[in-house]
């Protein structure tokens, strides 16, 4: 399993809405993420900077690169575009994070 971490940006004042939407995550989206190999996906918020820190695990044979082509993924990104920073096509702006320490 590989661990992947990245950062996104939530619009100010959108914490509760972000939490609500994720509590109500669509079952079809959960299935798509699991089918792509996404495991143990977590998102944390830095309330001072509005940065979202995401971390997930995925196996060697994952298909996460195919997620943007799925209709359910595109719909989720459209659904989230009003509360976070996105590209014009509503893809969340993400910055990969580089691992610097691991305590097994």
Image (tube, rainbow, N blue to C red):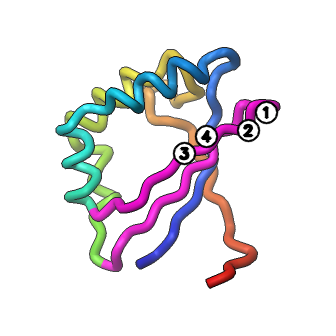
Q: Is residue 75 left or right of residue 1?
A: left
- Whether residue 44 appears in magenta in the rendering, the answer is yes
Q: Quick one: label 1 or label 4, which is nearer the N terminus?
A: 4
CA distance for labels 4 and 3: 10 Å
Q: Nearer the viewer, mark 3 or mark 1?
A: 3
At label 3, counting other C-alpha atoms closer than 10 Å, the crowd grade (few under 14, some 14-19, many 20 or more) is some
Q: Nearer the viewer, mark 2 or mark 4?
A: 2
Q: Is residue 55 left or right of residue 28?
A: right
Residue 13 lies in quadrant: top right
Q: Nearer the viewer, mark 1 or mark 4?
A: 1
Q: Quick one: label 3 or label 1, which is nearer the N terminus?
A: 3
Residue that carries the numbered disc 4 in the rendered image: 8
Against 46, residue 67 (above or below) is below
SS for tag 1? loop
- Whether residue 84 appears in magenta in the rendering, the answer is no
User: What residue sits 29% from the left and 64% below the top?
Assistant: 37
Q: Quick one: label 4 or label 3, which is nearer the N terminus?
A: 4
Q: Nearer the viewer, mark 4 or mark 3?
A: 3
Q: Quick one: label 2 or label 4, which is nearer the N terminus?
A: 4
- Kindly check if marks 2 and 1 are in contact, taking CB atoms under 8 A apart as contact: yes
The numbered mark at residue 49 is 1
Place of residue 59 in the rendered image (x, y in percent of width and height, measured from the top left): 34, 75
SS for tag 4? strand
The span picked out in magenta is 37-60
Residue that carries the numbered disc 3 in the rendered image: 43
Place of residue 16 in the rendered image (x, y in percent of width and height, measured from the top left): 56, 20
Residue that carries the numbered disc 2 in the rendered image: 46
Place of residue 73 in the rendered image (x, y in percent of width and height, measured from the top left): 29, 38
CA distance for labels 2 and 4: 11 Å
User: What residue sits 57% from the left and 25% below the top?
Assistant: 84
- Kindly check if marks 3 and 1 are in contact, taking CB atoms under 8 A apart as contact: no
């Amino acid at each position: 399993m590989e661990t992947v971490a990245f950062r996104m940006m939530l619009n100010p004042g959108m914490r509760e809405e972000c939490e609500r939407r994720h509590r109500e995550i669509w079952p079809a989206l959960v299935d798509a993420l699991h089918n792509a190999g996404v495991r143990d996906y977590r998102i944390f918020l830095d309330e001072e900077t509005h940065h979202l820190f995401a971390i997930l695990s995925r196996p060697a044979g994952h298909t996460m690169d195919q997620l943007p082509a799925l209709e359910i993924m595109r719909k989720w990104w459209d659904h989230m575009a009003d509360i976070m920073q996105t590209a014009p096509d509503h893809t969340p702006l993400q910055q990969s994070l580089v691992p610097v320490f691991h305590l097994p």
